Image (spheres, helix red, strand yellow):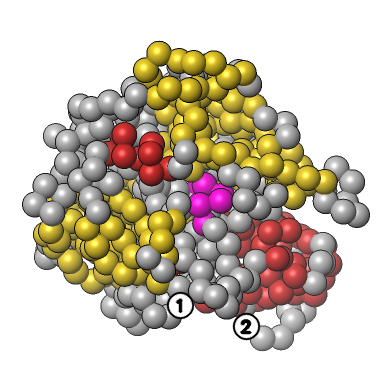
Amino acid sequence: MRTRGRPRHPEVLTPRQQDVLRYLQQGLTNEEIAGRLGISADGVKFHVSEILARLGVNSRYEAAQWQPEAGRRRWALALAPFAALQRLKLNALTAAATGLAVLFVAAGIGALAWGIARTGGGRHAEPRATLGAADPDLVIFSAAPPGRYPDAHSRRTVTVYDASARQVAHQFEIGDGVTDQPDEVVAAGDKIVANLMRRVVRYELDGTGETELWRASDGSYAFGLAASPDGTRIAFSTYTPGDCERAAQTPGALATPCAVSPRDNSLVRAIDTMTGRGLLSVDQADPALGQFMGPASVVGWTAAGDAIIVLGRTTDEAPGVLAEVALDGTIRPLPGNNEFFETSPDGRRRLASTRRACDSLDLQRERIAIVDLADGRELAAVAAPDRNILPLEWSPAGDAVLYYALAIEPKPGEPGCYRNIDGTEEWHVLRDDGTVLDVPDPATARRAWYGDLRLVEYRCGGEPSPADWCMNPDQSYGTTGIYIGGQHVADVFSTSFLLVQQVAPSS
């Protein structure tokens, strides 16, 4: 899986989405944009939802402010996703991406002693809380080469690093550089599966045996990709633009406004990883999916691998509607205020949040909670009304969430709205037993979780960075150095990095 919140180059947007983004930057409402483009307000809503996910931002306000040359820290969102929605990798934020996601977990040994913890808002000494680390094995990531913004059709390189041998075991390119648009990449057992937008492809770990599992028709594209815990199944969503919407992409206004109903053209799919045999195809217009407004992203599987977790956007364009879609077609809505964040690596937990809104837009999270996916029980929570709480990634065991909190201040001229105070990051780990651990930086938690040999670190200009972003002096994105176990493994373009797997696949 991937982390969410990864800034994307504008070329990843469709021409229509670029039109909508330009009007967002001019401050137009959905109704005003609809009038300019000759489409319905619901159609604009769908495009805004896609833009938020593809740019990895929380709100239309952030989308309007976003510029590729100015950039933003993709780890600041945590999850997010189209992950195309994307995207959710839980350890790379990322995430999150869509998000740094660890897909498969091996039993592990090791411990980290923590001296001070904060629980329930108060501070007190805690007796040696521990977080286990798994044995070293494969670390898999994909990225575009450094040097330039990757466009929509850039090829990507997949790297399989053997942490035990301390060397790159395999490296290969995905995408044809012409029609493919490499997006999500997941580890599925001992295979690698990539979403190239117009097709979904399986590879061996060394890049051989390229096999198409799905190919688009009628202008369809795939987004969101997740593998079941045992790797035998993958799930993703597809969207097929209707005739009217395709016509709206061409220059010139339509005589009759185009009533886009993206739910009617969207499916949630599950297929067999080895054969490509279809296991599930559910129309997202199904009334059981409730408030879903537009394509829903696949964000995970249940622990048993018999149901997919999908997340959609609500009528106010904010994430928050989760549903469990079983392979027999049964749909179970998951109530509560949900977070646009991958389910835990073990498929047993999800994240919920309480968000402070400004003009109906999601700006700050003042509370996050770990929720049992099966029965909806809240297992642990942390609240800080004077902070913006940003979840970053799950622990590989799925029993804790790494997050950071930013101080906030009122936004001048906008009553009830707030903005982050830069440089106030406070790093913490929320465990499912309710304990909140203070950590000096994300590397401390990651080292406890993954061990020294599999610890992925990022460096910008030779200096450590919390995540895979690097800014040049002119505020453009630059080259990020990727280090694993202290060894320099690759240099990548900052916005293109995707951590696929940091622990060994489940046996």
Secondary element under disc 2, as helix, strand or loop, is loop
Query: The C terminus lies in which quarter of the figure?
Result: top left
- Residue sitting at x 24%, y 43%: 452
- Residue sitting at x 8%, y 52%: 165
- Residue sitting at x 60%, y 39%: 405
CA gap, disc 1 and disc 2: 26 Å
Of mark 1 and mark 2, the one earlier in the sequence is 1
Q: Quadrant of residue 45?
A: bottom right
- Residue sitting at x 80%, y 72%: 26
- 367 part of magenta stretch: no
Q: Where is residue 365 in the image (x, y as percent from the top left)?
A: 66, 38
State whether residue 88 appears in this view: no
How many other residues sit within 10 Å of disc 1, few (<14), some (14-19) or many (≥20)? many
How many other residues sit within 10 Å of disc 2, few (<14), some (14-19) or many (≥20)? few
Which residue type carries mark 1? Tyr
Secondary element under disc 1, as helix, strand or loop, is loop
Q: In which quarter of the image is residue 168?
A: bottom left
Q: Position of residue 35 (x, y in %)?
A: 82, 71
State the residue lying farthest toward the top: 127
Q: Position of residue 355 (x, y in %)?
A: 69, 37
Query: In terms of depth relative to the viewer, which is nearer, 258 or 153?
Result: 153
- Residue tagged by mark 2? 250
With respect to residue 107, does 33 lie above or below? below
User: Start and end of the magenta stretch?
Assistant: 74-79
State whether residue 61 appears in this view: yes
What is the number of the mark on residue 149?
A: 1
Q: Position of residue 25 (x, y in %)?
A: 75, 70
- 76 part of magenta stretch: yes
Query: In terms of depth relative to the viewer, which is nearer, 360 or 69?
Result: 69
Which residue type carries mark 2? Thr
Image marks 1 and 2: residues in contact by CB distance under 8 Å: no
Front of the two marks 1 and 2: 1
